[in-house]
Image (cartoon, rainbow, N blue to C red):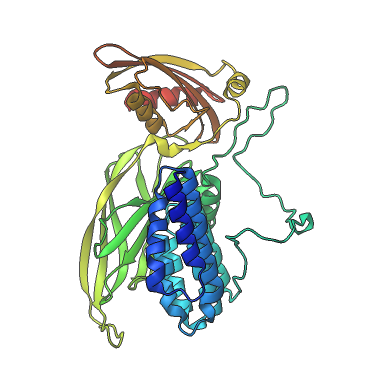
Amino acid sequence: MHKADMVIIEAARAITELNGVTSRELTPAITVLQLFLSSSKPVLRFAAIRTLNKILHFLGNEGPKTSDPSKYIRYIYNRVILENATVRAAAVSTLAKFGSLVESLKPRIFVLLRRCLFDSDDEVRDRATLFLNVLESDGTVGESVKDEPSEEPFNISAVSKEVKPQPLTEKKIQGKKPSGFGVSSNGVTQSVDTYEKLLSSFPEFSGFGPLFKSSSPIELTEAETEYAVNVVKHIYSGHIVFQYNCTNTISEQLLENVTVIVDASEAEEFAKVASKPLKQLPYESPGQIFVAFEKPDGLPATGRFSNLLKFEVKEVDPASGEVEEEGVEDEYQLEDFEVVAADYMLRAPVLNFKNAWDSLGPDCERIDEYGLGVRESLAEAVNAVINILGMQPCEGTEVVPNNARSHTCLLSGIFIGNVKVLVRLSFGIDGPKQVAMKLAVRSEDVGTSDAIHEIVANG
């Protein structure tokens, strides 16, 4: 860290720790810390995160006790919108403390926490889910999630002895070396567990079996439009459920009988089997619409889906909140999205690729060679194949040295049906930038090895 950066960080931290500091005096310090959040230097990013978390922790403890606690809510929620995932998670905890301690703010906090359910980060979504459940049951948030280091000594007796099942981790096979397969550390399983509880509570989807994977939200509307909609793809063995997360951003409107008309004419292997519309979508109160399709069981069916939001609009008097009885039918065109082969693969790192490769053995191995055409570099070709397969790069092999003429990339994953898969990619590039690739696949099932080759061939 440069000495000047250290001085700036320490000055910003000192300002935040001053007694009686005003918001006008605090703003420059916050701005500087925000800039350091995007620094290329990890030490600077860590220092900025730690200081911002300290501010949020302090606000959560002291803000609700002030004469006008509501004035802090916008600042805290802005951290959810503007900052990185670590700070966003801390801001969710702080909002929840306000909702727990200030009864008059609870409805407003509910709205803000529900928005956080659609965050791209698992930790933020999980905290929002936890605190919504706590607040709805009239519980006290207290110190459910601590964002500051504790001065108390560690007490092992206070640790829960409950062991949560991990359905996708490897079961040891007699006579074979453990392959080292594990669930990706990006929180996929935890997110799937949350979604599975939600979806299984609906009779329409309860018979679909275990949920294999849920995608990250895909935005279907532009920013700052009348209606904000994103979609999450929930993958089952023989079905797929699209969860449309919708927000009405117009205060003078109430939407009723809200549904999404899905055109699957470019997804011939899918057949619609169920839908769950929304009765109402009030202003700034997120809601969910679900549409389910049947697909060939256990196969990576793909396709493109067009989407049209349909609803009845009723005018709302902004002064009184009264809703007009008569409404008008309306619709709103959403962006298309695709179901791709990578949706059927979970990223699952292995601790030792060679051991994992040897443990699977050659029985279900498939090897073939492919021409990838003209590419700007080997790195471009490597990234393209990784994205097509949706697998986890192992041992840093996704990084291609500058000006390399050949490269080997190792990938691991779990294919739909909970089938372990390993891939060894060997790339070469010639003078005219033509890239050739040798693909070796090992899995627990020969059909899966063939499917991986088919995905690459069609990609």
The location of residue 436, given as percent across then percent down, is 34, 15
The location of residue 240, given as percent across then percent down, is 42, 46
Q: Looking at the rendering, in which quadrant would you find the C terminus?
A: top left
Q: State whether residue 335 is above or below residue 51.
A: above
Q: Is residue 125 visible?
A: no
Residue ID at (46%, 67%): 113
Which residue is outermost to the bottom?
A: 320
Q: How many marks?
A: 0
For this view, does 113 lie left or right of residue 404? right
Q: State whether residue 201 is above or below residue 40.
A: below
For this view, does 396 lie left or right of residue 251? right
The location of residue 354, given as percent across then percent down, is 59, 20
Residue ID at (29%, 86%): 322
Residue ID at (49%, 57%): 10
* Image quarter of residue 158: bottom right
* Near-viewer residue (424 or 303): 424
Which residue is outermost to the right?
A: 157
Q: State whether residue 282 is above or below residue 406.
A: below
The location of residue 454, given as percent across then percent down, is 38, 24
Q: Is residue 407 visible?
A: yes
* Near-viewer residue (6 or 157): 6
* Near-viewer residue (183 or 232): 183
